[in-house]
Image (cartoon, rainbow, N blue to C red):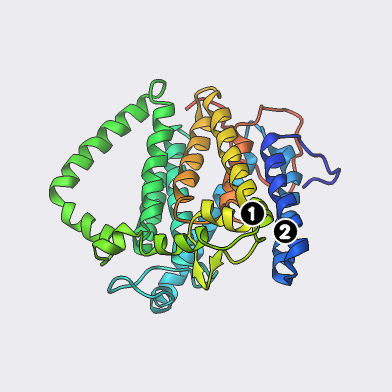
Amino acid sequence: MNPKIRLRPNVFLSLVCLLVVDTVITSTSAHDLSTVFLAFRLAEFVAGLWLLTPWWGRDDMLLFWCHFRCLVVSLGSVLLGLLITPGHAFAAQNTVSATGRLSGVIWPMVPTQVAQYAAVAAGLMVVLWLAHLLSGRLTLAGVTVAVVILLLTHTRTALAGLVAGILVAGLSVFTVNARVRKFFAAAAAATSIGVIFVAGVVTTWLARGENAQGLATLSGRTNYWALVLNQPRTRFQEIFGFGLSTTGIDGLPIDSSWLAAYMQEGIFGVVVCAMMLAWLLATAFFQPRGVRRALALFLLTYCTLASYTEVGFTDASTYLLHLTVVASLIAPLTRRVISPPSIRTAPNSSSNA
């Protein structure tokens, strides 16, 4: 894909490289082989992202389309596993309801990961339809399947990220796209009717059988977060963290990108992650209105909201890949590109939404 090792300079991956430097520094003093392995894996992952930079700024959005198709294939494997072994698909987790939470069987995926793929795929399909890049029937079928999968995972963060992402992406082209204005009007009417007739069902689904204390502590997450903040640290560990790990403390999950960054990479890592999001958001804000900007804002909104209760900014993860796709969408357009003959490009998508 990049035989001549061409690299396109950019701010985003330069900031990500600072995270790699942090992990290398902490791994040399951690005396833990797992930390060294995770640091090497992150460095290898970021090197792969650099090799994809010549694909950035293509008018056919090749990197985005490859990313989108991978999400669809992943959801297809979840759906296939559900159809083949429904009991196994719902039995992998400690259930919070009578039916449990949907997980991946053919390709092992936890419910939150399945929900992330479903929410992102559904949101991107809606944005592409609003930009006249997907047909109505294909969008309706795809979004219906993705939303059903999302609901079966019982993941509230993904649902909130989906709604917020579509809202922000739609507002970015609200004044220049008549379809967006009609869609928002129809969505507002449907929401008003839904509040009247299905409010009880929605409330029950959102509660997931939890009591008021469970909802207040975000399913117990805030109890674990206090352990992160109260962990004894040296000055070095406060600045650079303890090194990459399984994003847990005392055997308990952290489930927050910001606290995970503080635990693994210290204050330095938290600042770098904030700079990554701030730079992408500022750059996207000054982009011309269109489909590229709308797609970038959807992914940015989703990742920012999900970072509060899920991890992924400081390690090799799909969230870091989402942000890389955002950076490729808002990069200046270029005509000098690498075009692998084995990859079929999507139709031209440079028109405004």
294 or 248: nearer the eye? 248
The correct choice, above or below, for 60 with respect to 272 in the image is above
- What is the distance, in whole Å, between disc 1 and disc 2 at their CAs? 8 Å
Picture residue at 25% right of the left edge, 67% below the top: 209
Location of residue 351 in the rendering, given as x and y in whole percent from the top left corner: 54, 26
Q: Residue at x 36, y 48 (%)?
A: 160
Q: Is residue 222 left or right of residue 199?
A: right
Q: Residues within 10 Å of mark 1 (few under 14, many from 20)?
A: many
Residue 12: x %, y % from top left: 66, 38
Q: Where's residue 219, x and y in %?
A: 35, 63
Label 2 sits on residue: 26
Is residue 44 among what the camera can see?
no
> Is residue 306 among the parts visible in the rendering?
yes
Question: Could you tell which of marks 1 and 2 lies nearer the N-terminus?
Answer: 2
Q: Quadrant location of residue 164?
A: top left
| Residue at image point 36% right, 29% down | 179
Which residue extends farthest left? 196
Q: Is residue 257 above or below residue 57?
A: below
- Can you tell which mark lies on residue 74? none
| x 50%, y 42%: residue | 299
**Which disc, if any, is residue 265?**
1
Q: Is residue 108 above or below residue 255?
A: below
Instruction: Tell whether 254 sits left or right of 219.
Output: right
Q: Label 2 near label 1: C-beta < 8 Å? A: yes
Density class for disc 2 (Cα within 10 Å; few <14, some 14-19, many ≥20) is: many
Q: Could you say which is closer to the camera, residue 306 or residue 274? A: 274
